[in-house]
Every structure is written in structure tokens, then in C-alpha cells.
Image (cartoon, rainbow, N blue to C red):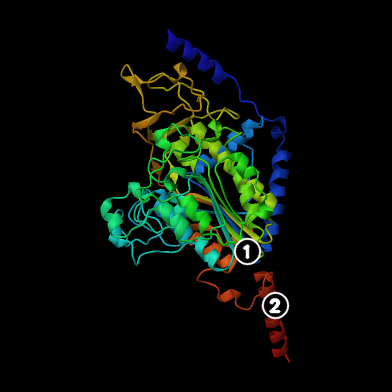
């Protein structure tokens, strides 16, 4: 009887035509839209060859192309629109490429090996950060001699200010490749390391954050417990044992971080939103913000009075970093997009992606494309998808318009290839109409049961704007990305094109001067 009722309801839904804006019925609407886009594209013939004084890299962890599309729709629907026609901030970037994400030893990558690629410029094995492919995961003795430096280090060596902002732990896979050299991404503190590795001289990632590049101006995210001695009560959650300090070496790394700063500089350690928002960027040289013992709380669960948002962290970071006349490099990670997908909780994943897109827009308002290269990409994708012939404007978290023609049950548009959403009730697929599939913690159905959903292996998008952004085009190996950012910034190994240029002088000017000189020579040869 219940199935018959649902069949009836879905037949009614199918017979109802999808609604869409009235203006879209007029072909002139689409012609004008295309012509406006063409006009904008034609302006790109005048390439931006300026020197990138600043570089900002936004990394959406696990933000594959299906996630980008679904985020776009959600953004529009939150604004009361159908959603499909909406533009994300990253959609507005003029240059788009595809990045091949595989690790040297993995067809479907992990976040550590990929971070080494897009930050250090070399592909690496899964599970390792800041070391080349000669290093073996978990084998400490394969670290020495195989370290590779990152674009954050290249920028710092060039006199720029640098920063890392993440919604995960600051010693998680993505940020750690910017400063650490470790054969195991899970060595967050010495508590997670095997005794043999400690005896062999390998250092945990939190220790490396404080010591390897001691003058990183901005560090924000989670991971507080890895900075304090084991069993030290957390300042925010003193009664929660899982929040206690983890370090076996007895070090208080936040204290060491403060002590290592020059006496003529102002450094601040903060652990809550009030402290962060109370900073005066013009008076602060260094900030270490650790806002949770582990990863930051999902945006949908965030306490907006005590926990800073990604957008707020990015604003403070840029205001501190932009004081350097030589410019800055900033890595921003929307890290919990990935976590939402792993848990099969698409609502969390997409709302995390929206927050990163808002931060991208803010960064654009605070900088200029004349001197700031901005790159937005992902480390890998997920086995996340949405489909089912849904009508225009269908809630991105809603049902497909028809029942399955095999088990006669409804299904949501969003599904996963594998993961924790696989459920059988009385030997058959769960009827999703009997559960609250709009709840943030709803785990979308999956084809294969796993405790955690897995990454996807397809290429991911790279969006770019600003100086030399046109060099990100077509299909690239992932490790190509930092080489472009370094070339545009005149840092790192490839600086031959920068030798004769002073600050503020552009590639475009150099090319124009060369062209003019050649024209003169050609004219002289005519006489």
C-alpha cells in the first residue's frame, strides 16, 4: 500500500513541468548572454604578464568537478534561485585547466602525495609529504636526502610573507606539505610515531611546523592537542580526555613558537574567535591560531560566537600578510569538504565548499588581479555524484523525480559509489522516504558498503586569475601548478626571465620592448 502511494505521488511529480525563469523562454536572452561572454573572452587576448607580487592558492580538499557543480546549485538555491544558472566566485576566473591527480604509486590519490605535487612541484607516493618518490611510507630511514621544498619556502626565501589557513588540523596532509618532510602523514605528534622512527631521528609534523620554517607569519586552523605535553588538559574542553595534549617529549610547542620570535616583532597565539577578531593586523607580525584540539567544526555545526569561520580567518591573514612590500604567499584549504564526503554527508561537504567560495570572493575584494595570482583547485575528487533526470531547480539534496524501475523505491539525486550510506532493510535497499534525507548528517546511499567513502580518480579543475594565469590551461600534471605560481612570482628555480626587471615591471612591458626593438631592426634592414 505504501509503495503504491509513493508511485502515485511520483507520477504526479513527473506530470508537473519544471519551473524556470520566464526570461529564459526568449531566445534573445541566451544570445545576449553568449555575446556578453564572448566580449569578455576577447579581452583576454591582452595577456596579464605582470609580476605576481602576491599568490593565493585555494585548495578545496576533495572538491572534484561534481562537487563544484553541486556547490554552484546549492549557492543559488540558498539565494532563492533555481541554482543551475548561478556563478561561483571561482566560476568567474578566466582560465580553467584540468589536473591529473594520481600519485607515483597510486592511481587514485591521497591528500599527502597530491599536496607534495601542487606545493613542492614533484609527484610523490601516497601518504608522504614534502619528500620525493624515493621515500617509502612509514620508513623513517628513507627521509634524509629525499626532502623537497615547497613554494611557501621559495616565497619565504625571496623575502615574502607566508601563511597557511585551513579548516583541518594545521599538521594535516595538505598544510604539512608546505613546511614538513615526513614519510607518514599520520605522524601528527611524536605520540603517533613508532619508537624506531623517533630513535632514528625523524620528527613529527607539529614539531616541524614550529622549527622547519620558523618565521611563517600566519598559521591558522585546528590541531591544538598536538602542540602540548601528553595529558595536558585542553583550554576549551578541559573535561574531554580526547582533547588532551598528546606529546611524549613534554614540549609545549606554542610556547616555543612564541619564544622563537624576534623581540622587535609582535607575535600572538590565539585559540578562539574573540581573540582572533580582536587582533589589530597593523600591529601584529605573527599569529598562530589553533581553534580546536583536532579539525575545526563543520560550518553547519560551528558556534559562530566562539569559532572563527574560514572567511574570517582569511580576512585576518591577508591583512597581516599584505603589509610586506615584497608581497606574500597564502595557502587556504577548505579541508572539511573532504571529510563530509568521506562520511557520506553531502550537505556538510557542499556547505564547506560554499564557505571556501565566499573566502575566494573576499580575497578578490582585498587584492588586485594586476599583482595577485589566485589559483583554486582540488587535490583529488570523490565518488560523489548527482543525477536521476531531476527537474530544473530541484533541491540539490532532494529526490529524483521517478521511482527506481527495479525496486520501485524513491532515491535521492545525490549518491555515492561507495561509503557508509549503504543500508539494507529487510534484505532490500532502504526506502529513503522513511528517513530525513535533508538532515545535515544524512548519509547518502552508496553502491558499496564501506566505513568511509573513498576518493575518486578523475582529473580535477584548476581555476586561475591574475598575472600569468594563462599558463594554466589544458590538461596538466598536478606538479606543474607550483612551477607556474613560482614563475609568475619570480621565485624558485626559474627566474631567468626576471633578472633584468625591477619591482613593478611587467612581463608585458618586457615583451613590448623586445617587439619594438625587433621592429626597428627589421626597418633598418630595409635600407
Q: Position of residue 332 (x, y in %)?
A: 55, 50
For the question of whether residue 477 can be seen, the reply is no
Secondary element under disc 2, as helix, strand or loop, is helix
In the rendered image, the quadrant that contains the C terminus is bottom right
Residue drawn 45% across the image and 61% down it: 212
Q: Position of residue 46 (x, y in %)?
A: 69, 63
Residue drawn 36% across the image and 24% down it: 423
Q: Position of residue 240 (x, y in %)?
A: 43, 32
Which residue is the extreme one toward the bottom?
A: 527
Secondary element under disc 1, as helix, strand or loop, is loop
2, above or below 59, in the image: above
Numbered label attached to residue 23:
none
| Residue 208, picture quadrant | bottom left
Q: Earlier in the sequence, mark 1 or mark 2?
A: 1
| Residue topped by disc 2 | 513
309, above or below 163, in the image: above
| Residue topped by disc 1 | 52
| Residue 140, picture quadrant | bottom left
* 1 vs 2, front mark: 1
Label 1 CA crowd tier, 10 Å (few <14, some 14–19, many 20+):
many
Label 2 CA crowd tier, 10 Å (few <14, some 14–19, many 20+):
few
| Residue 182, picture quadrant | bottom left
Q: How many marks?
A: 2
For the question of whether residue 59 can be seen, the reply is yes
In the rendered image, the quadrant that contains the N terminus is top left
> Going by the image, does 432 lie left or right of 45?
left
Residue drawn 53% across the image and 36% down it: 350
Amino acid at each position: 500500500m505504501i509503495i503504491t502511494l509513493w508511485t502515485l505521488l511520483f507520477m504526479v511529480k513527473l506530470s508537473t513541468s519544471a519551473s524556470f525563469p520566464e526570461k529564459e523562454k526568449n531566445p534573445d536572452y541566451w544570445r545576449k548572454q553568449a555575446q556578453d561572454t564572448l566580449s569578455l573572452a576577447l579581452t583576454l587576448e591582452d595577456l596579464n604578464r605582470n609580476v605576481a607580487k602576491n599568490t593565493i592558492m585555494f585548495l578545496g580538499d576533495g572538491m572534484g568537478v561534481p562537487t563544484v557543480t553541486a556547490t554552484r546549485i546549492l549557492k543559488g538555491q540558498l539565494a532563492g534561485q533555481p541554482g543551475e544558472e548561478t556563478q561561483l566566485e571561482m566560476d568567474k576566473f578566466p582560465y580553467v585547466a584540468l589536473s591529473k591527480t594520481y600519485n607515483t604509486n597510486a592511481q587514485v590519490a591521497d591528500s599527502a602525495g597530491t599536496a607534495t605535487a601542487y606545493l613542492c612541484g614533484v609527484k610523490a607516493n601516497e601518504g608522504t609529504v614534502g619528500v620525493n618518490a624515493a621515500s617509502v611510507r612509514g620508513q623513517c630511514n628513507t627521509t634524509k636526502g629525499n626532502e623537497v621544498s615547497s613554494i611557501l619556502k621559495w616565497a619565504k626565501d625571496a623575502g615574502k610573507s607566508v601563511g597557511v589557513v585551513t579548516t583541518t588540523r594545521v599538521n594535516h596532509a595538505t598544510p604539512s606539505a608546505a613546511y614538513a618532510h615526513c614519510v607518514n602523514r599520520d605522524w601528527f605528534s611524536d605520540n603517533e610515531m613508532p619508537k624506531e622512527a623517533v630513535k632514528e631521528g625523524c620528527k613529527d609534523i607539529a614539531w616541524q611546523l614550529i622549527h622547519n620554517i620558523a618565521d611563517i607569519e600566519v598559521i591558522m586552523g585546528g590541531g591544538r592537542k598536538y602542540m602540548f605535553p601528553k595529558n595536558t588538559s585542553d583550554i576549551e574542553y578541559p573535561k574531554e580526555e580526547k582533547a588532551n595534549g598528546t606529546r611524549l617529549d613534554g614540549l609545549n610547542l606554542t610556547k616555543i613558537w612564541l619564544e622563537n620570535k624576534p623581540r622587535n616583532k609582535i607575535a600572538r597565539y590565539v585559540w578562539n574567535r574573540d581573540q582572533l577578531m580582536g587582533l589589530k593586523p597593523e600591529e601584529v607580525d605573527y599569529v598562530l591560531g589553533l581553534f580546536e584540539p583536532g579539525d575545526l567544526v563543520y560550518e553547519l555545526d560551528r558556534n559562530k560566537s566562539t569559532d572563527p569561520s574560514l572567511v574570517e580567518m582569511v580576512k585576518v591573514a591577508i591583512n597581516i600578510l599584505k603589509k610586506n612590500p615584497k608581497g606574500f604567499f597564502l595557502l587556504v584549504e577548505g579541508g572539511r569538504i573532504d571529510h563530509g564526503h568521506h562520511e557520506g554527508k553531502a550537505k556538510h561537504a557542499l556547505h564547506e565548499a560554499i564557505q571556501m567560495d565566499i573566502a575566494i570572493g573576499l580575497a578578490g575584494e582585498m587584492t588586485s588581479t594586476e599583482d595577485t595570482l589566485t589559483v583554486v583547485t582540488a587535490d583529488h575528487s570523490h565518488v560523489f555524484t548527482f543525477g536521476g533526470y531531476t527537474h530544473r531547480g530541484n533541491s540539490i539534496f532532494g529526490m529524483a523525480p521517478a521511482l527506481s524501475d527495479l525496486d520501485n523505491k524513491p532515491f535521492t539525486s545525490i549518491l555515492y559509489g561507495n561509503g557508509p550510506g549503504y543500508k539494507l532493510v529487510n534484505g532490500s535497499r532502504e526506502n529513503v522516504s522513511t528517513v530525513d534525507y535533508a538532515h545535515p548528517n544524512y548519509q547518502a546511499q552508496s553502491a558499496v558498503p564501506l566505513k568511509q567513502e573513498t576518493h575518486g580518480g578523475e582529473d580535477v579543475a584548476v581555476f586561475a586569475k591574475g598575472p600569468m594565469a594563462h599558463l594554466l590551461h589544458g590538461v596538466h600534471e598536478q606538479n606543474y601548478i607550483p612551477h607556474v605560481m613560482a614563475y609568475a612570482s619570480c621565485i624558485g628555480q626559474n627566474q631567468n626571465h626576471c633578472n633584468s626587471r625591477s619591482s613593478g615591471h611587467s612581463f608585458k612591458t618586457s615583451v613590448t620592448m623586445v617587439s619594438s626593438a625587433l621592429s626597428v631592426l627589421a626597418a633598418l634592414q630595409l635600407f
